[in-house]
Amino acid sequence: MEAQQPMSGERVRGGSPGVLLAAAAWLAVYLAARFALQYLRAGSVEAIFMAIAPVWAFFAFVWAVQRALRRADELQRLVQLDALAFAFSTTICVLMGLGLLDIAHGGRLEFPPMRDWWALLPVLYAMCLVVARRRYR
Amino acid sequence: MRNDLRERRAERGWSQADLADRLDVSRQTINAIETEKYSPSLELAFRIARLFKVRVEDVFQA
């Protein structure tokens, strides 16, 4: 197999730094909100404001992803689809399994709090993205 | 799908990045097509054939 060409001067599509930056900003705002919510009075305006803050950061992330996808070529879109399809289906499978196990144990099965399970999807997506990119390398 | 994209590119002395720029795709896509890990869409296959001034079936063989 021929050695890969140098990266200099090439047009890089998808996987843009903007997406990574937006993802990092979203994560930072989320962690800050989780931290702050431990100290804010439940039901207060400040607590509600902090709870909503990550949603706006997430919208910014979605906008960055949409922008990158519009500039991506067909292979990069296929890689994204591969990663999303696997992450989405695996997340549903895990959540369904946990739900059924909970029923099987009469609702007494102790999980990490349900409010944290959403994180499974982005983590799986990131992992699947790495695998999908390797597949076509 | 088999193809002789690498040979055709080499004949012209183009790098993968050169060809990617001419086709408006990423270098990774060119590499994946050349290593036959990815079969391009019909639209991209026609663009490739047009660039090399040949028929699609001259570049790609099933």
Image (spheres, coloured by chain):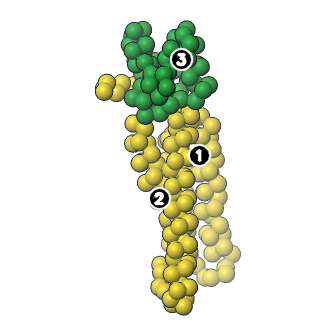
The tint of chain B in the picture is: green
Which residue is label 3 attached to?
Answer: B57
Q: Are marks 3 and 1 in contact (CB under 8 Å)?
A: no
Judged from this view, the residue extending furthest toward the front is B62
Residues tagged by mark 2 and mark 3 found on one chain of the structure: no
Which residue is label 2 attached to?
Answer: A124
Look at 62% across and 51% down and name the residue there. A62
Q: Quadrant of residue B32?
A: top left
Image position of B14 with respect to A58: above or below: above
Q: Residues within 10 Å of mark 2 (few under 14, many from 20)?
A: some
Image position of A100 with respect to B38: above or below: below
Which residue is label 1 attached to?
Answer: A65
**Which is closer to the viewer, label 2 or label 3?**
3
| x, y percent for residue B30 | 46, 26
Look at 65% across and 58% down and name the residue there. A56
The N terminus of chain A appears in which quarter of the rendering? top left
Q: Residues within 10 Å of mark 3 (few under 14, many from 20)?
A: few
Q: Quadrant of residue B10?
A: top left
Residue A39 visible at all: no
Image position of B11 with respect to B20: above or below: above
Image position of A94 with respect to A74: above or below: below
Amino acid beneath label 2: Leu
Q: Chain of mark 3?
A: B
- Per the image, label 2 sits on a secondary structure element best described as helix
Question: Judging from the image, what is the letter of the chain drawn in yellow?
Answer: A
